[in-house]
């Protein structure tokens, strides 16, 4: 083995050791027709507990001779669901027994209230739903079972006067959060994401179907996440258009989905409370905009909690070429850096981990899967110009994108360009990107060999942020010149 190859492989070894609502357009049919809206439940009787503006004191409900739900119901409790919150969170009753619950949803997305015995009352946005539950002498806890909502604070309890409050609002019968996730030897093998950049779409008007899919995905060998996706992949499909093109995104949420979802294109100029609003399972909407600014842009789900939806896979890249377009190159690639915060095997990521003030992802990856381009290097020619479109999807960690053994002769970052053959002879060794920032880098490989792709925050390289460009046959031919 010659000295040059030893140096390259040594870098890899060191890196691995560092860290252990508009209508659809005319003429297009609806793939998933909207489901009829559910009729709101009748207004809650005046005897119910009214929610307070702030929840310092616990709400108290006296027994009432009511049979709003049926049986020997002792009273009615009202809980208001706002986006990612309950009002009140703590209620008190005079005696144990069966009580009616009315869930009034004043938020913009679906919520439920779920009890330890499995009883679930679900209310769509703007609706009220009712049900009943038995409250034991020791009290009861409740939460919203929509993934991420309880972690965001949608928890509460009902206390019986004269008894101790419930010790935990998490006692809903589910498994306790896992502190250490072990690899599953039976997990399916990861599927390699093709890093090839897409071609520019033909024409100047683009109708694009963006279909949401909730599924399981192996994100690293032995680790499976219940992901939420655009188009069935993480990241979602890369989209490439010319400056000035009209883009018509047909966002579709199948009836088989469990959650509402939305999309936010950073390349658009639209109001947040317009096309970006959420759609429920079985609905779709048109998100239309003209691409007025060039760049590498992020798109993502913005449904609350947006942190959870992005961390769970709902993000992608959109490339808008500048005036006159980019110089055609044969070798172009698209790489999206992102993080995985593992929950239980096969379940969505942990919002608690993702929301930590000092986040520590289990994996930091390129294009959704840990180490996939180390295990299957990206093959490129020697001496020809290579272009890579970059995006840091986050949701939390910065990127310091670096390719060992080469220098970027061209960098376009957020509209600022380092031009090739510039008068000062300047080059770039790394491109720093905060979450939601994008860039384009161009470079050439001077020799056959292996060139590691990393974030130069080396504490993350051993967590999956390592790939390889394989130039030529991978064996260096020319010594240092």
Image (spheres, rainbow, N blue to C red):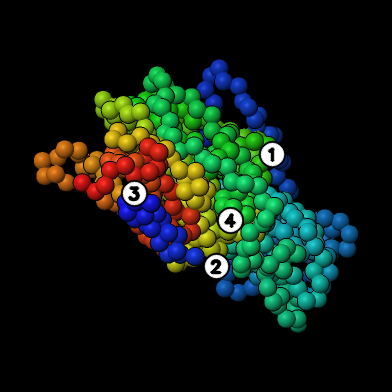
User: Spatial distance from mark 3 to mark 4, Cα to Cα?
Assistant: 29 Å
Using the image as rendered, state which of residue 314 and residue 167 is in the foreground: 314
Name the one closer to the observer, 72 or 410: 410
SS state under label 4:
loop
Residue 386 coordinates in the image, percent (x, y): 32, 36
Residue 317 in view (yes/no): no
Mark 1 vs mark 2: in front = 1
Instruction: In the rendered view, tell whether residue 216 sits above or below residue 19.
Output: above
Q: Which residue is mark 2?
A: 54
Tell me the quarter of the picture where residue 141 sits: bottom right
Crowd class of label 1 (few under 14; some 14 to 19; many from 20; radius 10 Å): few
| Pointer 1 with pointer 4, Cβ within 8 A | no
Q: Residue at x 64, y 66 (%)?
A: 178
> Residue 157: x and y, percent?
69, 69
Which residue is drawn at the image coordinates 75% and 55% (left, top)?
120
Mark toward the viewer: 2 or 4: 4
Q: Which residue is mark 4?
A: 349
- The residue labelled by disc 1 is 256
Q: Of the residues under marks 1 and 4, which one precedes in the sequence?
A: 1
Residue at image x 41%, y 20%?
Answer: 202
Foreground tag (1 vs 4)? 4
- Is label 3 in a helix, a strand or a loop? strand
Sequence-wise first label, 3 or 4: 4
- Marks 2, 3: nearer the viewer: 3
Residue 403 — which label?
3
């Amino acid at each position: 083995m010659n000295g040059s190859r030893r140096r390259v492989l040594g870098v890899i070894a060191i890196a691995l050791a560092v860290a252990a609502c508009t209508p659809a357009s005319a003429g297009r049919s609806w793939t998933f027709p909207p489901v009829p809206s559910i009729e709101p439940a009748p207004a809650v009787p005046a005897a119910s507990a009214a929610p307070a503006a702030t929840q310092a004191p616990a709400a108290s409900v006296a027994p009432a001779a009511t049979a709003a739900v049926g049986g020997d119901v002792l009273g009615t409790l009202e809980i208001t669901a706002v986006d990612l919150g309950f009002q009140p969170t703590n209620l008190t009753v005079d005696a144990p027994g069966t009580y009616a619950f009315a869930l009034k949803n004043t938020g913009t997305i679906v919520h439920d209230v779920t009890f330890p015995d499995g009883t679930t009352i679900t209310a769509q946005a703007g609706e009220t739903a009712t049900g009943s539950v038995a409250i034991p002498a020791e009290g009861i806890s409740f939460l919203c079972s929509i993934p991420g909502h309880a972690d965001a604070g949608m928890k509460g309890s009902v206390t019986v006067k004269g008894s101790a409050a419930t010790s935990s609002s998490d006692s809903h019968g589910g498994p306790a959060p896992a502190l250490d996730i072990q690899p599953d030897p039976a997990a399916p093998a990861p599927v390699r994401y093709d890093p090839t950049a897409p071609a520019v779409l033909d024409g100047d008007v683009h109708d694009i179907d963006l279909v949401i899919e909730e599924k399981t995905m192996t994100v690293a060998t032995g680790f499976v996440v219940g992901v939420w996706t655009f188009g069935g992949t993480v990241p979602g499909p890369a989209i490439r258009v010319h400056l000035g093109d009209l883009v018509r995104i047909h966002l579709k949420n199948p009836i088989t989905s469990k959650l509402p979802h939305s999309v936010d294109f950073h390349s658009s100029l639209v109001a947040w409370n317009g096309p970006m609003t959420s759609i429920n399972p079985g609905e779709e909407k048109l998100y239309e905009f003209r691409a007025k600014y060039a760049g590498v842009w992020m798109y993502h789900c913005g449904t609350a909690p947006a942190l959870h939806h992005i961390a769970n896979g709902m993000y992608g890249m959109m490339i808008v070429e500048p005036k006159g377009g980019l110089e055609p190159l044969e070798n172009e690639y698209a790489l999206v850096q992102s993080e995985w915060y593992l929950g239980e095997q096969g379940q969505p990521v942990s919002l608690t981990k993702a929301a930590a003030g000092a986040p520590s992802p289990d994996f930091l990856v390129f294009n959704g899967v840990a180490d996939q381009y180390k295990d299957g290097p990206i093959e490129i020619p020697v001496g020809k110009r290579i272009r890579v479109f970059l995006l840091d999807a986050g949701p939390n960690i910065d990127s310091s994108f670096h390719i060992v053994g080469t220098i970027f002769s061209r960098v376009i970052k957020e509209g600022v360009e380092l031009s090739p053959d510039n008068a000062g002879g300047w080059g770039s060794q790394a491109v720093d990107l905060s979450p939601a920032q994008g860039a384009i880098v161009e470079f050439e490989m001077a020799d056959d060999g292996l060139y590691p792709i990393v974030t130069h925050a080396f504490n993350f390289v051993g967590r999956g942020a390592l790939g390889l460009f394989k130039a030529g046959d991978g064996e260096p031919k020319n010594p240092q010149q």
